[in-house]
Image: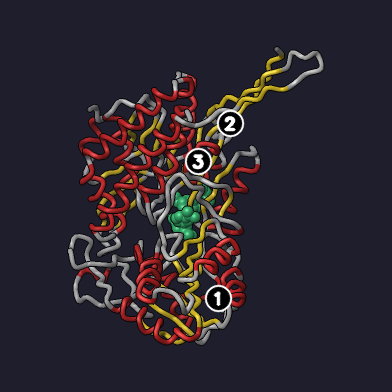
Amino acid sequence: MQHSPDYADHKATLIGNYVGGRFVTEGVRFDDVSPVDGTIHARVVEADRTLVDQAVSAARAAIDAGWGQLSIQERVTWLRRIADRMEQRFDDFVAAEMADTGKPLALVRSLDVPRGIANFRIFADLAVGFQEESFRTPTPDGRGALNYTVQKPLGVVAVISPWNLPLLLMTWKVAPALAAGNAVVVKPSEETPATAGLLAEICHEIGLPPGVFNLVNGFGPNSAGEFLTSHPGVDAITFTGESTTGSAIMRAAAATVKPISFELGGKNAAIVFADADFEAAVDGTARSTFLNCGQVCLCTERVYVERPIFERFVDALRLRADALVPGRPDDPKTTMGPLISTGHREKVLSYYRLAIEEGATVVTGGGVPHFGDDRDAGAFVQPTILTGLAETARCVKEEIFGPVCHVTPFDDEADAIRMANDTRYGLAAAIWTSDLARAHRVAPLMETGIAWINTWFLRDLRTPFGGVKLSGIGREGGRHSLGFYSEPMTICVKL
Ligand code: NAD
């Protein structure tokens, strides 16, 4: 276990960069602020252009030094070592993720950290069985030809991740990229760098070859994010975040025609038919609207409910919202944490105000909770349910990314499908019905990357994941991730 001494000295409060197997703590620092009470819980070293250059060079050198040529069995052994060490340091990851995001302890323990670890195990298993193809082709001389593919790494992969599920979404990219033989330079969100810092420690502790995993901290424009995505030495970019950021990254990547994989924003719909299991539909919609304080790309922000059950559904959903308990992450009574920052809270509150200007009825919420203690300096908002808006209202069209939904009645199936699809986004949809034929009829008509029937957020990690329209480009998950992170090459042998 070799920490560089300068890093170990400041471990509790300083999050450094990790480049070519070395922790770098020199440089301009910025604050890592708790969204629970506004206190500064860590200082983060911003990577400048020179350090980003060094990280890209170190990644390239690691590939050339042999990482790219390791057998798949050797590489997946490294992935399993990472997972094992993460498991040993499970509580450190929980503490770091809670400090950065303010999420309730139970959520971090049951979702963020286990899924972060599982990503390494799952992609280790999948990579071993990743198929190469071969074809025998007839030729005029009767001897034929053998065509076969070899999967090669892309090279240096830039991983740009968001703040809402920091560890989960970062490892979802790092694990398959490494399994496929690439080296990575990771740029976590400036709001949530702590778990990426811990992952760098783990790579160091287990002796992962220097340069295979590099970490550069910083912001987007004019900072580490842009330096990395426009870098000529980066061979591919995988990004999760806002659709507008995706556009900026696409422009930066255009000059060197880099392959990109984008998982972007959403404005996801749920359709609740009158024949649905009522309690399951209300519980499911409450969860899909309010989980992680509404900060999951898959969260429902538009709910379409068949008119005969509309009033009853809105009442029941309101009871679920009002029962949520905002509070500190380590308080067992807490069921909803804060938004990620007071800056993001201002954006969400501006939509709460806009909804009223646009003529909404605020069924519940619409403001901020008052605690009478230091949490009033945090980023909490009330869970909010809106009705009465026109389908053209900005609050029905734009991604808010908070604990809020608008509920609209509908009269027939075609109407519900039309409204659900009338959006520039296309990530996810949920359909609640007990009519099996209808479920299977409606689901494929959703213009989204995934549609759930009578559930939400459930998914086998081997399935393709991604969005259409403004919600993304490409698919990750299972062999689809391995497909993105590798370059198939064809070899043809005349027999
Ligand atoms: P964001 O786009 O603001 O930031 C994401 C990352 O991009 C951060 O690391 C940021 O520093 C970096 N970045 C910003 N500008 C950049 C630039 N010009 N060049 C390079 N990097 C840049 O997103 P966020 O606010 O962190 O996350 C929330 C958004 O992510 C929401 O829109 C949400 O829907 C989306 N999201 C999508 C998925 C999905 O799978 N589709 C999953 C989670 C979150």
**Residue placed under numbered mark 1 in the picture:** 394
* Number of residues whose C-alpha sits closer than 10 Å to that of mark 1, classed few (under 14), some (14–19) or many (20 or more): some
Question: What amino acid does circle 2 point to?
Answer: Glu
Image vertical order of residue 393 relative to residue 490, above or below: below
Q: Nearer the viewer, mark 2 or mark 1?
A: 2
Relative placement, left or right, of 326 versus 419 is left
**Residue placed under numbered mark 3 in the picture:** 481
Is the C-beta separation of discs 2 and 3 under 8 Å?
no
State the quadrant of the N terminus.
Answer: top left
* Number of residues whose C-alpha sits closer than 10 Å to that of mark 3, classed few (under 14), some (14–19) or many (20 or more): many
Residue for point 41% across, 85% down: 362
Residue 36 place in picture, x, y as percent: 26, 64
Residue 311 place in picture, x, y as percent: 42, 87
Residue 88 in view here: yes
Q: Which of the labelled discs sits on residue 280, or is there none? A: none
Residue 54 in view here: no
The residue closer to the viewer here, 460 or 434, is 434
Residue 373's image quarter? Answer: bottom left
Indicate which disc, 1 or 3, sits on the residue closer to the N terminus.
Answer: 1
Instruction: Note whether ligand 1 is within 8 Å of mark 1.
Output: no
Q: Secondary structure at mark 1?
A: helix
Indicate which disc, 2 or 3, sits on the residue closer to the N terminus.
Answer: 3
Residue 296 place in picture, x, y as percent: 41, 60
What's the CA distance linking mark 2 and mark 1?
A: 41 Å
Image vertical order of residue 259 relative to residue 280, above or below: above
Image vertical order of residue 342 relative to residue 176, above or below: below
